[in-house]
Image: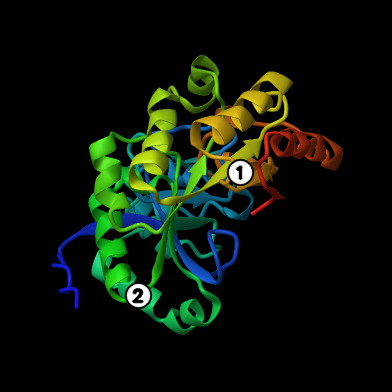
Amino acid sequence: MALPRAMDSSVSGTIFNVQGYSIHDGPGIRTTVFVQGCPLTCSWCQNPESQLRQPQIFFDRDKCQGCGKCVAVCAEAAISLVDGKSLTDRALCIGQGDCATVCPNDARSLIGRSATAAEIFEELSADAIFYRQSGGGVTISGGEPLAQPAFAREIFKRCKDAGFHTTLDTSGFAKWEVAKSVLDYVDLVLYDFKHMDAQSHKRLTGVSNELILDNAKRIHHELGIALWARVPIIPGHNDGPDNVAATARFIAEELSPEIPVNLNAYHPFGESKHERLGRANATFSTAPPSEARVAEIAAVFRAHGLTVAIGG
Protein backbone atom coordinates (compact mmCIF):
# COMPACT_ATOMS: atom_id res chain seq x y z
CA MET A 1 0.00 0.00 0.00
CA ALA A 2 1.34 3.41 -0.99
CA LEU A 3 2.08 5.74 1.87
CA PRO A 4 0.09 9.02 1.99
CA ARG A 5 1.97 11.95 0.49
CA ALA A 6 3.19 14.67 2.82
CA MET A 7 0.83 17.64 2.69
CA ASP A 8 1.55 21.29 3.33
CA SER A 9 -1.45 23.13 4.77
CA SER A 10 0.27 26.50 4.40
CA VAL A 11 0.37 26.50 0.59
CA SER A 12 -1.98 29.12 -0.80
CA GLY A 13 -2.83 30.75 -4.11
CA THR A 14 -5.23 33.06 -5.88
CA ILE A 15 -8.27 31.86 -7.81
CA PHE A 16 -11.20 33.56 -9.51
CA ASN A 17 -13.66 30.68 -9.75
CA VAL A 18 -14.39 27.10 -8.77
CA GLN A 19 -16.85 25.74 -11.31
CA GLY A 20 -18.76 22.56 -10.64
CA TYR A 21 -20.31 20.27 -13.21
CA SER A 22 -17.72 21.07 -15.87
CA ILE A 23 -18.10 18.73 -18.84
CA HIS A 24 -15.63 20.27 -21.29
CA ASP A 25 -12.46 20.24 -19.16
CA GLY A 26 -11.61 16.55 -19.34
CA PRO A 27 -13.48 13.25 -19.07
CA GLY A 28 -16.67 12.86 -17.05
CA ILE A 29 -18.15 15.39 -14.67
CA ARG A 30 -15.47 17.60 -13.19
CA THR A 31 -14.88 20.56 -10.95
CA THR A 32 -12.57 23.16 -12.48
CA VAL A 33 -10.42 25.48 -10.40
CA PHE A 34 -9.55 28.68 -12.26
CA VAL A 35 -6.36 30.25 -10.93
CA GLN A 36 -5.28 33.83 -11.51
CA GLY A 37 -2.11 34.99 -13.18
CA CYS A 38 -0.82 34.16 -16.66
CA PRO A 39 2.49 34.89 -18.42
CA LEU A 40 0.61 35.16 -21.72
CA THR A 41 -1.51 38.14 -22.76
CA CYS A 42 -3.51 36.58 -25.58
CA SER A 43 -5.25 39.22 -27.66
CA TRP A 44 -8.47 37.17 -27.72
CA CYS A 45 -8.44 36.07 -24.06
CA GLN A 46 -11.96 35.31 -22.91
CA ASN A 47 -10.98 35.68 -19.25
CA PRO A 48 -8.78 38.81 -19.16
CA GLU A 49 -9.53 39.09 -15.44
CA SER A 50 -7.28 36.04 -15.04
CA GLN A 51 -4.14 37.62 -16.50
CA LEU A 52 -2.97 39.39 -13.34
CA ARG A 53 -2.21 37.43 -10.17
CA GLN A 54 -4.01 39.79 -7.81
CA PRO A 55 -7.80 40.07 -7.38
CA GLN A 56 -9.35 42.77 -9.55
CA ILE A 57 -12.41 44.97 -9.59
CA PHE A 58 -15.04 44.62 -12.29
CA PHE A 59 -16.84 47.92 -12.81
CA ASP A 60 -20.17 48.37 -14.60
CA ARG A 61 -20.37 52.08 -15.35
CA ASP A 62 -24.06 51.94 -16.25
CA LYS A 63 -24.94 50.83 -12.73
CA CYS A 64 -22.88 53.52 -10.99
CA GLN A 65 -24.93 56.38 -9.48
CA GLY A 66 -21.96 58.36 -8.28
CA CYS A 67 -22.82 58.09 -4.58
CA GLY A 68 -19.15 58.21 -3.57
CA LYS A 69 -19.26 55.39 -1.02
CA CYS A 70 -16.49 53.58 -2.87
CA VAL A 71 -14.32 56.70 -2.76
CA ALA A 72 -14.69 56.94 1.01
CA VAL A 73 -13.61 53.36 1.77
CA CYS A 74 -10.71 52.98 -0.68
CA ALA A 75 -7.55 52.89 1.46
CA GLU A 76 -5.35 53.33 -1.61
CA ALA A 77 -7.20 56.49 -2.74
CA ALA A 78 -7.55 54.78 -6.13
CA ILE A 79 -11.11 55.96 -6.77
CA SER A 80 -12.42 59.43 -7.67
CA LEU A 81 -15.65 60.83 -9.03
CA VAL A 82 -15.52 62.12 -12.60
CA ASP A 83 -18.61 63.41 -14.40
CA GLY A 84 -20.89 61.84 -11.82
CA LYS A 85 -19.33 58.35 -12.06
CA SER A 86 -16.61 56.64 -10.08
CA LEU A 87 -13.27 56.18 -11.82
CA THR A 88 -10.56 53.74 -10.67
CA ASP A 89 -6.86 54.35 -11.05
CA ARG A 90 -5.85 50.77 -11.85
CA ALA A 91 -2.19 51.53 -11.09
CA LEU A 92 -3.16 52.19 -7.45
CA CYS A 93 -5.87 49.54 -7.03
CA ILE A 94 -4.72 46.36 -5.24
CA GLY A 95 -8.05 44.57 -5.40
CA GLN A 96 -8.88 44.86 -1.71
CA GLY A 97 -12.59 44.83 -2.53
CA ASP A 98 -14.01 47.22 0.09
CA CYS A 99 -15.49 49.32 -2.71
CA ALA A 100 -17.45 46.33 -3.98
CA THR A 101 -18.76 45.60 -0.51
CA VAL A 102 -20.26 49.08 -0.02
CA CYS A 103 -21.56 49.65 -3.56
CA PRO A 104 -25.38 49.81 -3.27
CA ASN A 105 -26.01 49.03 -6.95
CA ASP A 106 -23.52 46.21 -7.58
CA ALA A 107 -21.62 48.43 -10.00
CA ARG A 108 -18.44 47.02 -8.49
CA SER A 109 -17.56 43.37 -7.91
CA LEU A 110 -14.35 41.73 -6.73
CA ILE A 111 -12.95 39.04 -9.01
CA GLY A 112 -10.51 36.72 -7.27
CA ARG A 113 -9.73 35.49 -3.78
CA SER A 114 -6.90 33.93 -1.88
CA ALA A 115 -7.27 30.42 -0.52
CA THR A 116 -5.12 27.57 0.73
CA ALA A 117 -4.84 24.35 -1.22
CA ALA A 118 -6.45 22.61 1.74
CA GLU A 119 -9.49 24.90 1.54
CA ILE A 120 -9.83 24.34 -2.21
CA PHE A 121 -9.57 20.58 -1.75
CA GLU A 122 -12.43 20.67 0.75
CA GLU A 123 -14.59 22.40 -1.87
CA LEU A 124 -13.58 19.84 -4.48
CA SER A 125 -14.30 16.90 -2.20
CA ALA A 126 -17.97 17.88 -2.01
CA ASP A 127 -18.37 16.64 -5.60
CA ALA A 128 -16.55 13.34 -5.11
CA ILE A 129 -19.66 11.26 -5.81
CA PHE A 130 -19.99 12.87 -9.27
CA TYR A 131 -16.36 12.14 -10.10
CA ARG A 132 -16.68 8.50 -9.16
CA GLN A 133 -19.98 7.90 -10.89
CA SER A 134 -18.99 9.63 -14.16
CA GLY A 135 -15.28 8.90 -14.43
CA GLY A 136 -14.62 12.58 -13.86
CA GLY A 137 -12.37 14.46 -11.51
CA VAL A 138 -10.62 17.77 -10.94
CA THR A 139 -9.19 20.18 -13.51
CA ILE A 140 -6.98 23.17 -12.75
CA SER A 141 -7.22 25.87 -15.40
CA GLY A 142 -6.67 29.59 -15.49
CA GLY A 143 -5.06 31.92 -16.04
CA GLU A 144 -2.10 29.58 -16.07
CA PRO A 145 -1.79 26.91 -13.35
CA LEU A 146 1.96 26.60 -13.94
CA ALA A 147 2.29 30.25 -12.84
CA GLN A 148 1.26 29.04 -9.36
CA PRO A 149 3.09 25.70 -9.35
CA ALA A 150 3.26 25.03 -5.60
CA PHE A 151 -0.47 25.76 -5.27
CA ALA A 152 -1.45 23.57 -8.24
CA ARG A 153 0.87 20.77 -7.11
CA GLU A 154 -0.56 20.74 -3.59
CA ILE A 155 -4.15 20.59 -4.84
CA PHE A 156 -3.29 17.78 -7.24
CA LYS A 157 -1.43 15.87 -4.52
CA ARG A 158 -4.49 15.89 -2.32
CA CYS A 159 -6.72 14.89 -5.23
CA LYS A 160 -4.49 11.96 -6.14
CA ASP A 161 -4.51 10.69 -2.57
CA ALA A 162 -8.31 10.88 -2.63
CA GLY A 163 -8.43 8.90 -5.88
CA PHE A 164 -9.64 11.80 -8.03
CA HIS A 165 -8.63 11.95 -11.69
CA THR A 166 -6.50 15.08 -12.27
CA THR A 167 -6.29 17.29 -15.37
CA LEU A 168 -4.01 20.25 -16.06
CA ASP A 169 -5.28 22.82 -18.56
CA THR A 170 -2.17 24.75 -19.64
CA SER A 171 -0.51 26.94 -22.23
CA GLY A 172 2.70 25.02 -21.54
CA PHE A 173 4.72 28.18 -20.97
CA ALA A 174 6.92 27.34 -17.98
CA LYS A 175 10.43 26.10 -17.31
CA TRP A 176 10.53 22.33 -17.56
CA GLU A 177 11.52 21.88 -13.91
CA VAL A 178 8.48 23.90 -12.86
CA ALA A 179 6.13 22.04 -15.17
CA LYS A 180 7.52 18.65 -14.11
CA SER A 181 6.93 19.41 -10.43
CA VAL A 182 3.19 19.73 -11.17
CA LEU A 183 2.96 17.03 -13.83
CA ASP A 184 4.10 14.39 -11.33
CA TYR A 185 0.50 14.49 -10.03
CA VAL A 186 -1.38 14.84 -13.33
CA ASP A 187 -3.33 12.19 -15.26
CA LEU A 188 -4.27 14.26 -18.31
CA VAL A 189 -2.98 17.46 -19.91
CA LEU A 190 -5.16 19.79 -21.99
CA TYR A 191 -2.58 21.63 -24.08
CA ASP A 192 -3.11 24.82 -26.08
CA PHE A 193 -1.56 25.33 -29.52
CA LYS A 194 -2.17 28.96 -30.46
CA HIS A 195 0.24 29.56 -33.36
CA MET A 196 3.15 27.62 -34.84
CA ASP A 197 5.23 30.61 -35.94
CA ALA A 198 7.37 31.94 -33.09
CA GLN A 199 7.15 35.62 -34.08
CA SER A 200 3.40 35.49 -34.71
CA HIS A 201 2.93 33.70 -31.40
CA LYS A 202 4.83 36.45 -29.60
CA ARG A 203 2.85 39.17 -31.34
CA LEU A 204 -0.47 37.57 -30.38
CA THR A 205 0.32 36.29 -26.89
CA GLY A 206 3.33 38.26 -25.66
CA VAL A 207 5.64 35.22 -25.60
CA SER A 208 7.37 33.02 -28.16
CA ASN A 209 6.34 29.38 -28.60
CA GLU A 210 9.68 27.51 -28.52
CA LEU A 211 9.34 26.56 -24.85
CA ILE A 212 5.69 25.63 -25.34
CA LEU A 213 6.40 23.27 -28.23
CA ASP A 214 9.42 21.74 -26.49
CA ASN A 215 7.40 21.09 -23.33
CA ALA A 216 4.62 19.44 -25.35
CA LYS A 217 7.13 16.98 -26.79
CA ARG A 218 8.67 16.26 -23.39
CA ILE A 219 5.30 15.69 -21.76
CA HIS A 220 4.34 13.20 -24.46
CA HIS A 221 7.63 11.43 -25.10
CA GLU A 222 9.38 11.58 -21.71
CA LEU A 223 6.48 11.39 -19.28
CA GLY A 224 3.88 9.58 -21.37
CA ILE A 225 1.03 11.52 -19.78
CA ALA A 226 -2.20 11.53 -21.78
CA LEU A 227 -2.47 14.77 -23.74
CA TRP A 228 -5.39 16.39 -25.56
CA ALA A 229 -4.62 19.21 -27.98
CA ARG A 230 -6.73 22.35 -27.92
CA VAL A 231 -6.55 24.71 -30.87
CA PRO A 232 -8.37 28.07 -30.82
CA ILE A 233 -9.56 29.33 -34.20
CA ILE A 234 -9.05 33.10 -34.33
CA PRO A 235 -10.09 34.46 -37.75
CA GLY A 236 -7.44 36.59 -39.38
CA HIS A 237 -4.80 35.61 -36.83
CA ASN A 238 -4.14 31.87 -36.72
CA ASP A 239 -6.61 30.35 -39.20
CA GLY A 240 -4.52 30.76 -42.34
CA PRO A 241 -3.83 27.59 -44.34
CA ASP A 242 -0.10 27.52 -43.58
CA ASN A 243 -0.57 27.75 -39.82
CA VAL A 244 -3.46 25.28 -39.77
CA ALA A 245 -1.39 22.74 -41.70
CA ALA A 246 1.70 23.37 -39.52
CA THR A 247 -0.33 22.86 -36.33
CA ALA A 248 -1.84 19.62 -37.58
CA ARG A 249 1.56 18.40 -38.74
CA PHE A 250 3.22 19.17 -35.40
CA ILE A 251 0.58 17.31 -33.40
CA ALA A 252 0.51 14.30 -35.73
CA GLU A 253 4.25 14.01 -36.42
CA GLU A 254 6.10 15.58 -33.48
CA LEU A 255 3.66 14.13 -30.95
CA SER A 256 1.28 11.40 -32.15
CA PRO A 257 -1.75 10.97 -34.43
CA GLU A 258 -3.39 9.29 -31.44
CA ILE A 259 -3.72 12.64 -29.66
CA PRO A 260 -7.29 13.98 -29.90
CA VAL A 261 -7.78 17.55 -31.06
CA ASN A 262 -10.42 20.03 -29.92
CA LEU A 263 -11.02 22.99 -32.22
CA ASN A 264 -12.42 25.95 -30.30
CA ALA A 265 -13.94 28.75 -32.35
CA TYR A 266 -13.35 32.29 -31.16
CA HIS A 267 -16.27 33.92 -29.39
CA PRO A 268 -16.28 37.54 -28.18
CA PHE A 269 -16.99 36.64 -24.53
CA GLY A 270 -14.01 38.63 -23.32
CA GLU A 271 -14.60 41.89 -25.16
CA SER A 272 -16.96 43.44 -22.61
CA LYS A 273 -14.68 42.34 -19.77
CA HIS A 274 -11.86 44.55 -21.00
CA GLU A 275 -14.05 47.62 -20.53
CA ARG A 276 -15.12 46.47 -17.05
CA LEU A 277 -11.45 46.10 -16.15
CA GLY A 278 -10.67 49.60 -17.37
CA ARG A 279 -8.86 48.33 -20.46
CA ALA A 280 -11.00 49.79 -23.21
CA ASN A 281 -7.96 50.38 -25.43
CA ALA A 282 -7.07 46.67 -25.22
CA THR A 283 -10.37 45.45 -26.63
CA PHE A 284 -9.86 42.77 -29.23
CA SER A 285 -12.52 42.28 -31.84
CA THR A 286 -12.93 39.85 -34.69
CA ALA A 287 -15.86 37.91 -36.08
CA PRO A 288 -16.28 34.28 -34.98
CA PRO A 289 -15.40 31.80 -37.72
CA SER A 290 -18.23 30.37 -39.76
CA GLU A 291 -19.26 26.76 -39.31
CA ALA A 292 -18.06 26.10 -42.85
CA ARG A 293 -14.58 27.46 -42.08
CA VAL A 294 -14.33 25.41 -38.89
CA ALA A 295 -15.32 22.32 -40.88
CA GLU A 296 -12.59 23.08 -43.44
CA ILE A 297 -9.99 23.37 -40.69
CA ALA A 298 -11.20 20.15 -39.08
CA ALA A 299 -10.75 18.41 -42.44
CA VAL A 300 -7.09 19.46 -42.53
CA PHE A 301 -6.46 17.92 -39.12
CA ARG A 302 -8.29 14.74 -40.09
CA ALA A 303 -6.20 14.50 -43.26
CA HIS A 304 -3.17 14.19 -40.95
CA GLY A 305 -4.78 11.18 -39.25
CA LEU A 306 -6.02 13.10 -36.22
CA THR A 307 -9.34 12.66 -34.43
CA VAL A 308 -11.08 16.03 -34.20
CA ALA A 309 -13.92 17.36 -32.06
CA ILE A 310 -15.34 20.85 -32.43
CA GLY A 311 -15.77 22.68 -29.13
CA GLY A 312 -14.93 21.39 -25.69
Q: Which residue does the image show at 45% across and 25% down from the upper left?
A: 209
Q: CA distance from mark 1 to mark 2?
A: 35 Å
The numbered mark at residue 163 is 2
> 10 Å neighbourhood of mark 1: few (<14), some, or many (≥20)?
some
Q: Quadrant of residue 212?
A: top left
Q: Nearer the viewer, residue 185 or 130?
A: 185
Q: Quadrant of residue 5?
A: bottom left
Q: Nearer the viewer, residue 132 or 126?
A: 132
Q: Residue furthest right?
A: 292
Residue 287 seen from this side:
yes
Coordinates of residue 116 in the picture (x, y in percent): 25, 64
Coordinates of residue 273 in the picture (x, y in percent): 58, 45
The numbered mark at residue 134 is none
Looking at the image, residue 189 lies above or below residue 40: below
Coordinates of residue 132 in the picture (x, y in percent): 47, 80
Q: Which mark's residue is nearer the viewer, 1 or 2? A: 2
The disc, 1 or 2, on the residue closer to the chain's N-terminal end is 2
The colour scheme used to paint the residues is rainbow
The numbered mark at residue 270 is 1
Q: Nearer the viewer, residue 262 or 75?
A: 262
- Rendered-image quadrant of the C terminus: bottom right
Looking at numbered disc 2 in the image, what kind of residue is underneath it?
Gly
SS label for mark 1 = helix
Q: Which residue does the image show at 30% across and 55% down from the upper left?
A: 152
Residue 19 seen from this side:
no
